[in-house]
Image (cartoon, grey):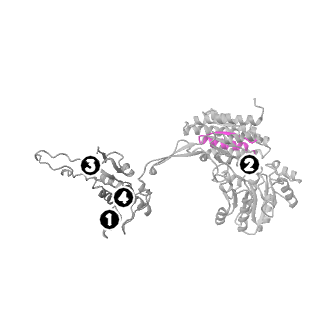
Amino acid sequence: MLEDRDLRSIQEVRSKVELAYKASQAFGGFTQEQVDSIVAAMAKAARENSVRLARMAVEETRYGNVRDKIAKNLLNCDLLHQKIAPLKTIGVLREVPDDGITELAVPVGVVAAVLPTTNPTSTAFFKALISVKAGNAIVMSPHPRARKCTCESARVLSEAAEAAGAPQGLVQCVNEATISGTRELMSHKRIGVILSTGGAGIVRAAYSSGKPALGVGGGNVPVLVDDSADIEAAVASVVEGKRFDFGTVCSSEQTLVTNRRHSERVWAALRANGAHVCDAEQGKALAELLFTPEFRIRPECVGQSPQVIAKLAGFEVPDSASILAVEIDGVGRDYPLSAEKLSPVLSVYFVDSFDQAVESCVTVLNFGGRGHTCTIFSQDEGHIREYGRRAPAFRVLVNTPAPQGSTGITTGVEPSMTLGCGAIAGNSTGDNIGPTHLYHVKRIARYLRPAEEAFVSDEAKAYFSALAAGEDFDSDAAPAAVPAGMAPSPVAARVDKYLASRAMARPAHPAPRPDRNPAPTVAAVVDRFLDRRKSQTAPAPAPGAPDPSRPATNANPDPAPPAPKIRPVSFVCEGDMRKARHSGAKIYISRSTIVTPAARDLDNGGDILVQTEA
């Protein structure tokens, strides 16, 4: 028995990853129907245990509240499952007959899932369901402060999956998770991809592990309440989002920005929705409480009720208080409450115009929330689009509470508990992560056309026309001098190079007649070569003609004349082959005949070139 806790964690990780890999290999043979049946069984078991596991999460972590944790659990085992159930994720995804393409899904294999302490059971449901739906196994590493509820969630899912026919070990959780064990999980050779949710440190560790990773960024969500908005309804929606699970969702509203002409209506609406409006002293106390001198969120304040936070800050609020609201005078490090707070504390910032409001929201996002989420309440479509264009966020929500909108409860975005923040935040995607991110697409591509038919530009047409005429674009020979008005030919350069190697001189040619095409043909180049060879090699006689290489005889003319002797040619290029193929002729070659590679390729059936013994 290992005594060192880190060593035990590492050994547990190694054993469970190997079992998960074995399960994933077996799972690869399952049909779409079998996979869907297993996912449905997992979702059903999760729904049946949502309330119990929500209570466990609050009891163990002391973050959030049971009512809203139940809602987050149901988001994944009800709404998410509805959304992903019809998806095709196994085998052939689609056929594209016009393009000759067949697309196949290829699972990543084993998913390493790092889970947070703020959403321990709902994230376990989410990551397990999308991983199995995509044909993968999953090994989860819980936050140490949420180990019991996360592992219990995994157990419920695993038992349901195996009862529905899944291989043993398809869904697992590390019981003794440590930092060393989590690092071992993320870097294990059997891991296909990492799904990382948590603080900036663990996300950076995932991206630096050497494995493909899907991580998240910080959320510092601004809310712009436009002049055209229903102010009272907008503020009520903001309060609903801010109080949800005591602000533990990364897409919770952080700073409400609006024109100062609406200040009285905003404060009145906040009070009407149960918000405690803090005075300047209480605001200062909150800023000192929520953040350490190093500007980190104090863990003891995360996900606590307004009453607990107010008491820790040194003042009292009624039990009916839904959130704490405090006015700020700017954005940035000099104004700590303009940062993400992970608690039911809402900052309120007044400006003088729509343009200033947009700029202030952009500043809020750049102060710890780049790429994540922003919200606008407006009836002006032009303002909505302008805000969406300028805001550096990948979820721009309109007239909805932010946590519910960003996760797909009140909007049409994909239901998800892992919200990518894109390259501007160091993430590999800005999407709401789902099953489609956990398999690759393999494509079977069939022959459609010859290469020259794929291109349409004049340059491409000229290139392929030159190739068909035998031009050689890969020649390393220096171009030889040619008569005025005649373009140099790469094939001629090749022939000249060959002649030079045989100590032969290329004969001068007269300038072309003006009524002739100035571009030399391949035939002309070959003729020029053969002219120099005539003294060494006589041309092959025409069929039926006497052989000039033999002396005349006085033989009896009555017998049939002998068959002419076949003489091989000395040089064959691509143009010769095309002509022979067109006319149905043969080309006779010997061991010493020069045959260009392109010509050889055109004789793929061996029906043109005939090897002689000469």
Mark 3, mark 4: which one is toward the viewer? 3
- Label 2 amino acid? Gly
- Answer with mark 3 or mark 4, whichever residue precedes in sequence: 4
* Residue 199 in view: no
Residue behind mark 2: 201
- Answer with mark 3 or mark 2, whichever residue precedes in sequence: 2
Residue stretch in magenta: 117-143
* Left or right: 253 in relation to 89: right
* Residue 501 or residue 322, whichever sits in front: 501
Query: In percent of the image, x 67 and y 51: which residue is there?
Result: 419
Residue behind mark 3: 567
Q: CA distance from mark 2 to mark 1?
A: 77 Å
Vertical position of residue 77 compared to residue 583: above or below: above
Q: Which image quadrant for residue 209? A: top right
Mark 2, mark 1: which one is toward the viewer? 1
Query: In percent of the image, x 73 and y 43: which residue is there?
Result: 120
Give the secondary structure at mark 4: loop
Residue behind mark 4: 469
Q: Residue furthest top?
A: 1
Mark 1, mark 4: which one is toward the viewer? 1
- Answer with mark 1 or mark 3, whichever residue precedes in sequence: 1
